[in-house]
Image: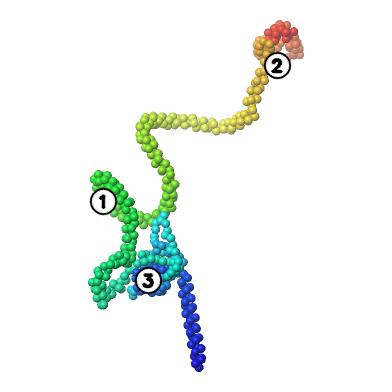
Amino acid sequence: MRRAWLAFTVVVLVLVVAVTAVAAGGGDDDGQGYRVRAIFDNASFLIPGEDVKVGGVIVGKIAEVELDRDNKAVVVLNITDPGFQDFRQDATCEVGLQSLIGEQFVECQPTQKRGEGVTVAPTIKPIASGPGKGQHLIPVERTSSPVGPDLLANIMRVPQRERLRLIVAELGTGLAGNGPELRDVIQRANPTLQQANRLVEILANQNRTIASLVEQSDQALAPLAERRGDLAGFIRTSGRTAAAAAEQGEDLERNFVLLPTFLRELKPAAKRIGALSDQIGPSVANLSAQSTSINAAVTQLGPFSRAATPALLSLGDVAERGRKTFTRIDRLVTQLDRAGTPLAPLAKDLAELGSDFDRTGGIANLMRLLYYYTGSLNGKDGMAHYQRTTVFTSNCVDRKLTTEIDACNGQFNPDDTGADATDEDADTRSVSRAAPAGGTAERTKATLDTLLGPEATK
């Protein structure tokens, strides 16, 4: 019986060890996630299993809460949401109140908001060795632990009230040598103070710029002081403008309602304008380099405009006259248009003819014809040029000659139509044409002697 009981006890112990190992293994599985090691001055009421939030959304759980060698609270955050497993070096965490009964959670910002063009902070590198190896460290300077309202309410109760009195009485003595530490605790306890401290650091880094701004503001305000009367008038006018705008309050409210839609539609155009301004930068720089020449041109433009005024006035008179003239010739233009429209095909054919004539060498051939024709009609002897042909002018040339002339071999008789002429008349005309007159042969020989020389007619 005792052996059976001993065996049962051994089995139970084995099961307990197995369950413990499984539980430990489950914890290791959870530990394989993205773990953040946040250091707080105070982590009271924080327990493992509480929520870790980013922007009010649960992204993980608190895995461990422990103390380090400096008596700071170490809170290990297990981030299970893959979308938030990239904490940056500017990440912050703070303790928040989950409910009125004192339950708390941790609210984190994986990175800070930044404007366009601002470089993103690098990611937090895992701890290489030592406590928290493999975890991502957020130092105490980037965490805060606000005091809960329940603790403030407990101050007025006994014995916390008496304890507070003793703490206040001994505060000066207790903190005489810990002023810097107290200041750091107060700053980390209030996120607003942390941001104010960062603002002061930025202003300190920009002290030269601020000093330059102050000096330049004095120079800018000096002309404004000289025009303070105009400034007072502007203020009075702006008051009346504000009153008039108040009367149109409903319309202005409607404009503000439509403004977000307008801004969304304006955003693409603003981007294109920004790109245009970037591209136009070199052109503006070149114009700036030529500003002296541009100013001189603008200065001289005034005298040039005054000198050009009479010419422009004369041009206006001419234009006025031209308006009347064009009105009068409008009918003529219409008639020319009507006459030119039918001639368009003829002009086209003539253009094609001229093109073909020019393409086929018509002008050259015409000149060649004139050249060779002239050479064929003109001769050259030992003394000069002579013409091989000539025109004889006499009474025989007249086509309307009705009377017979001895020097002519033929004449034109309009009455001799051939219908009423007899055979005898025809024979007579034939005989008269065949028998040349003796005087004509002699004149022809004399002409040839004159043109060709006596040797050619022998």
Residue density around tag 1, few if under 14, some if 14–19, many if 20 or more, within 10 Å? few
- Closer to the eye: label 1 or 2: 1
Q: What element carries label 2?
A: loop
Q: Please state the horizontal and vertical placement of residue 389, each as a whole percent of the image.
A: 68, 14
For residue 198, above or below residue 239: below
Give the residue drawn at x 34%, y 60%.
198
Residues tagged 2 and 3 counted as in contact (Cβ below 8 A) = no
The first of marks 1 and 2 along the sequence is 1
Q: Is residue 38 above or below residue 454?
A: below
Q: In which quarter of the image is residue 447?
A: top right
Residue 100: mark: none
Q: Where is residue 381 in the image (x, y as percent from the top left)?
A: 69, 12
Mark 2: amino acid: Thr
**Crowd around label 3: few <14 · some 14–19 · many ≥20 (10 Å):** few
Marks 1 and 3, the one that precedes in the sequence? 3
Query: Measuring 48% from the left and 87% from the top, which residue is drawn there?
Result: 9
> Where 328 sits versus 220, above or below?
above
Asked if one can make out residue 313 in the rendered structure from this viewpoint, the answer is no
- Side (left or right) of 65 relative to 25: left
Residue highlighted by disc 1: 239
Local SS, label 1: helix
The residue wearing badge 2 is 417
Name the residue that disc number 3 marks: 69
237 or 268: nearer the viewer:
268
Closer to us: mark 1 or mark 3? 3
Whether residue 207 sits left or right of residue 347 in the image: it is left
Pick whichever, 183 or 456, lies toward us. Answer: 183
